[in-house]
Image (spheres, grey):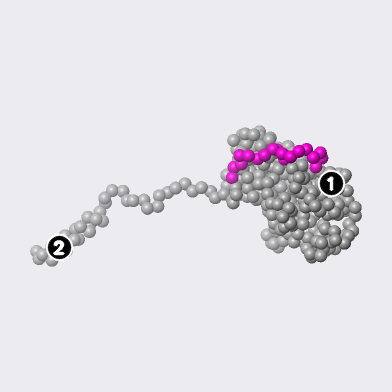
Amino acid sequence: MRPKLTAVFATFAVLVAGCGSAGDPHNLAPAVTAERPLPANAGKVTETGEPGGGSEDCGDPTVSLRPDGKDIPSNSTMDKIKESGKLRVGVDQNTYLFGFRNPTSGTLEGFDIEIAREIAEAIFGDDSKVQFVAITSGQRIDVLKEDKVDIVVRTMTINCERREDIEFSSVYFVAGQRLLVRKDSGHQGMDDLDDKAVCAAQGSTSLKNIAEVNPEAIPFAVDNWSDCLVLMQQGQVDAISTDDTILAGMAQQDPTTVVVGDQFTSEPYGVGIPQENKDMVRFINAVLEDVRKGSWQSSYDRWIEPVLGSSNPPRPKYK
């Protein structure tokens, strides 16, 4: 055989040998268990503070300043808002029935949105003169203190702790904290949730109440209530606990869930107002007096009654 041809065959033999089986192939992309993604700022909470607020007792926090009519004096808070051309309102855009964005029209709708529009109507004679600012539960007080909004109308419970930082209108709605669970979970109340993750919004009173009612449950905080629903649908939390009004909206969005248990708190909602704007408190209380006599019932019947049954506007308390 010629030397060159011998070299070719030798090279071919080496290549064939290299292509043969030499043990198990290397796994260039090893399989790993994928963790479900969490919403931003979501996680277990180890410290929730004192249930219902850790401040000194302020008496009955729902007592507000007595209304003195809907006139707008020169240089008043309302007059300055009128000059600005818009009422800036901190609201929710993720809570069905109270403050949510209609997916068809793109507009904000719900019970709280209609309360905000009533206040704008009283200032401008036009309920469209409002600039809605979407905020999370945890931002409600800060946006008032930092002058980013004029008022907050966002399922905000009146309590002594919050009164240290802001003013409140009289109560315009009373809710109560309960549980939302999957229908097939078997859970009937907070007693069933030892070592179970219970979701609530950061900055809400709900997290503190969970820790008080069942210290063995695991509070799990998120920025928005809609995040709680997604996490429960994915099996990352076992229940959601907050005001029954908010839970009712979730149950309508997801028919595989159900609201269970009795109310274990009372959650009186008020309009949040900067502490220095006492004239605005009295003005809004005058607006709410008219709302209770008129549009409150029609708004309630439209948004809330089909889910939670009939109700009447709460009676205000004044000092």
Q: CA distance from mark 2 to mark 1?
A: 101 Å
- Specify the principal SS of the magenta part: loop
Report the front residue among 40 and 24.
40
Name the residue rendered at 63%, 39% in the picture: 47
Residue sitting at x 71%, y 47%: 246
Q: Amino acid at mark 1?
A: Ser
Q: Is residue 13 above or below residue 157?
A: below
Judge whether residue 233 is colored magenta.
no
Q: Which residue is mark 2?
A: 7
Looking at the rendered structure, the kind of residue marked 2 is Ala
* Residue 67 position within the rendered picture, expressed as x and y whole percent measured from the top left: 88, 51
Image point (59%, 35%), residue name: 195
Spot occupied by residue 269 in the image (x, y as percentages of width and height): 78, 47
Residue 62 visible to the viewer: yes
Label 1 sits on residue: 64
Q: Which residues are magenta?
A: 43-61
Q: Which element is circle 2 on?
A: helix
